[in-house]
Image (cartoon, rainbow, N blue to C red):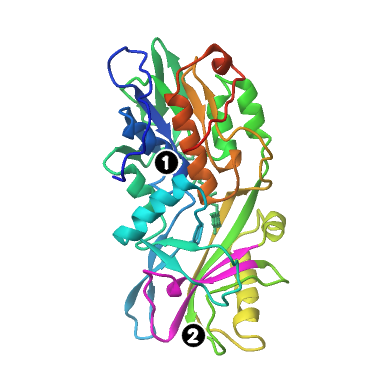
Amino acid sequence: MLNHLPLHPPRSTAGTLPVQVAVVGAGVAGAACAHTLAASGANVTVFDKSRGVGGRLSTRRTVWMDASGQERPVQFDHGASDFSAHSLAFRAVVQRGLDEGWIGRWSPTPSAVDAPFEHLVPMTGMPELCRALLGTQDVVTGEPVTGLHRVPGGWQIERDSGLWPQRFDQVVLALPPAQAAALLRPHADGWADAAARVPMEACWTLMAVTDTPPGPAFDVLHPCRGPLARIVRNDRKPGRQEIPGHAVWVAQASAAWSAHHRDDSPAAVSEALRDALRAVINPGGAVRWCHSTVHRWLYARPAHTPLGGPGCWWDAAKGLGVCGDFLLGPQVEAAFLSGLDLAQAMSSTPSPRRSAGSGAARFARM
Ligand SMILES: Cc1cc2nc3c(=O)[nH]c(=O)nc-3n(C[C@H](O)[C@H](O)[C@H](O)COP(=O)(O)OP(=O)(O)OC[C@H]3O[C@@H](n4cnc5c(N)ncnc54)[C@H](O)[C@@H]3O)c2cc1C
């Protein structure tokens, strides 16, 4: 587990016992919140519907068949491709990763792309950042949380397989806004409405292996026309395996194109995006597709950066909190800071001013 960040222990409704917290969502916001709460002495259990942690910091591993019929492994970072770190709090985590070697610096060419930010990449796959934050905490994966129930002294968590046996003093929702809204509805109507109103952009993403195309190699391109907004040579990122004679691509469609084709079939989207990728990497020529598949992110990023709103929502009276990128901005770092903000709010002394039903509060970061 990463070095503990200095924090006051959150108060338990049970007096001297450590506070029991359920964090729903093991993306970077949930992982940052859980990490910070655990560092301050809380007992945290993290729930995620996916098989693993990371959320939109995700890496898909699969195999493809080469020309000789041999199965070859390949990985695609099909959510966030990299991130940057500007705040002191996130830099501290990143520096630890750089020192220990599980985060690498990526210098994509052409170098003017996305300058002047540093591009940071977890070496073994994007979820590594969340795994490092979560350390040895209890993480329950593979089933969505379908309901929250207020019970005497706290909360119970419901999943399809039934009620989780443990009661929690406090619950954190670290989810995209539509999913948070569904769970908030019975308990915090105003928050549910506010979350449901946040527009999220969809993103169709193509993952492909081709023969190495002719022309100069590049790491990232942002085509200015056509369906694709960003093309990444995934195999040229730090820690990823290059395959001689081949190229591994992650190509994201633009928000406008993804919205227009939101409900198209994966086969139709794959054909359109492969055609668009071919036109960029071998204009006028052909491309040999060794493997390709598409993924649709329904909730890829918040459409707008929130202007001056709270970075998290915390109701001390109910013991209910919300964090995630939709409250601070469409980046990994913003999601991290939202989770950190919430953990800090939870560990502050509850005050009547802050604990009113609409009492969303933003707290200073370290
Ligand atoms: C295609 C794409 C490209 C991006 N590129 C970049 C980039 O280059 N740089 C950058 O900084 N950011 C990028 N982003 C944005 C960045 O990935 C997100 O802002 C950030 O990861 C959001 O983290 P989060 O914790 O708020 O949400 P999430 O990562 O979405 O985490 C929410 C978690 O909740 C889980 N969950 C949902 N519902 C339930 C439920 N009912 N019960 C239990 N668990 C549930 C999900 O499985 C998920 O793990 C990109 C995003 C996408 C999709």
Label 2 CB sits under 8 Å from any ligand 1 atom: no
Q: Visible in this render: residue 102?
A: no
Give the residue at x 33% y 49%. Answer: 132
| Amino acid type for the residue under numbered disc 2 | Thr
The residue mark sitting in front, 1 or 2, is: 1
Give the residue at x 38% y 65%. Answer: 62
| Amino acid type for the residue under numbered disc 1 | Ala
**First of labels 1, 2 by sequence position:** 1
Q: Which residues are magenta?
A: 229-253
| Residue nearest the observer in this picture, 187 or 147 | 187
The answer to which quarter of the image holds residue 4 is top left
Q: Mark number for residue 212?
A: 2
**Which residue bears the numbered disc 1?**
32
Give the residue at x 66% y 30%. Answer: 194
Please provide percent x and percent y for residue 26. Answer: 41, 42
Q: How many marks?
A: 2
In the image, residue 168 sits, relative to residue 102, either above or below, namely above
Mark 1: which secondary structure?
Answer: helix
In the image, residue 149 sits, relative to residue 127, either above or below, namely above
State the separation of the CA atoms marked 1 and 2: 39 Å
Please provide percent x and percent y for residue 263. Answer: 65, 53
* Label 1 CA crowd tier, 10 Å (few <14, some 14–19, many 20+): many
